[in-house]
Amino acid sequence: MDVTLIGQQVQTVVAELAQAGKLTAGKLMVIGCSTSEVLGKHIGKAGSEEVGAALYRGILAGQAPYGFSVAFQCCEHLNRALVMERSTAERYGYDEVTVIPVPAAGGSMAAYAYSQMTDPVVVEHIRADAGIDIGDTFIGMHLKHVAVPFRPSLRSIGEAHLTAAFTRPKLIGGVRAVYERTDANNSCS
């Protein structure tokens, strides 16, 4: 597996999603990843710190120009909890839980992210503005309503199936509702 290539692939997808979802500082992206699936193996059976490291570098390179925050989803053994910087958790009011992800309980991607962050914490639930799922790890539980599927230019990272989404505010109202602002609809009578 060419780890440089998978880092470049994920950097491309992160940047494309950031543009499509209009992600900027103050927004949050969740990343779910099976490094086993990236290697073409069954999820949870062949985790790789080397793959996690390459993906982490690519994710940060794709994120840097936009300034949004990133959370890394752990595996099912930690109930899909999330790793993020303490400052991000505090900004959003997320409650910290006590656990340190390791490859066998948390997954190689989350464990690697935890080891690289300045002041990492783990939280149980978030409401992210966008997300990337590498290897069918099911990130949907951590996205805000309403998720809008996004089709990046790449459909896989390594051997892993790739999906992505950004969110938008709910559309409410009925036949008289207006969803885009114009000067003609600024008043109600």
Image: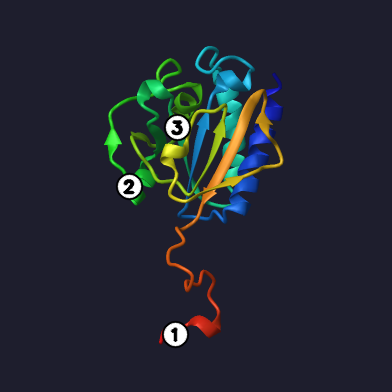
Q: Nearer the viewer, mark 1 or mark 2?
A: 1
Q: Inspect the image, locate mark 2, and give the three-letter code of the amino acid beneath it.
A: Glu
**Tag 3 secondary structure:** strand
Residue 5 seen in this snapshot: yes
Q: Nearer the viewer, mark 1 or mark 3?
A: 1
Report the residue marked by disc 2. 90
**In the figure, 136 relative to 87: above or below?**
above
**In the figure, 115 relative to 22: above or below?**
above
Whether residue 90 sits left or right of residue 148 in the image: it is left
Image location (x, y in percent) of residue 166: 54, 48
Residue 105 badge? none
Q: Inspect the image, locate mark 3, and give the three-letter code of the amino acid beneath it.
A: Gln
**Tag 2 secondary structure:** helix
The residue under the point 45% across, 58% down is 170
The residue under the point 43% across, 67% down is 173
Residue 73 badge? 3
Q: Quadrant of residue 172?
A: bottom left
Image location (x, y in percent) of residue 126: 38, 42
Mark 1 and mark 2 lie on one chain; the one further toward the N terminus is: 2
Mark 1 and mark 3 lie on one chain; the one further toward the N terminus is: 3
Residue 187 badge? 1
Q: CA distance from mark 1 to mark 3?
A: 44 Å
Mark 2 and mark 3 lie on one chain; the one further toward the N terminus is: 3
Q: CA distance from mark 2 to mark 3?
A: 18 Å
Query: Quarter holding the N terminus?
Result: top right
Q: Residue furthest top?
A: 45
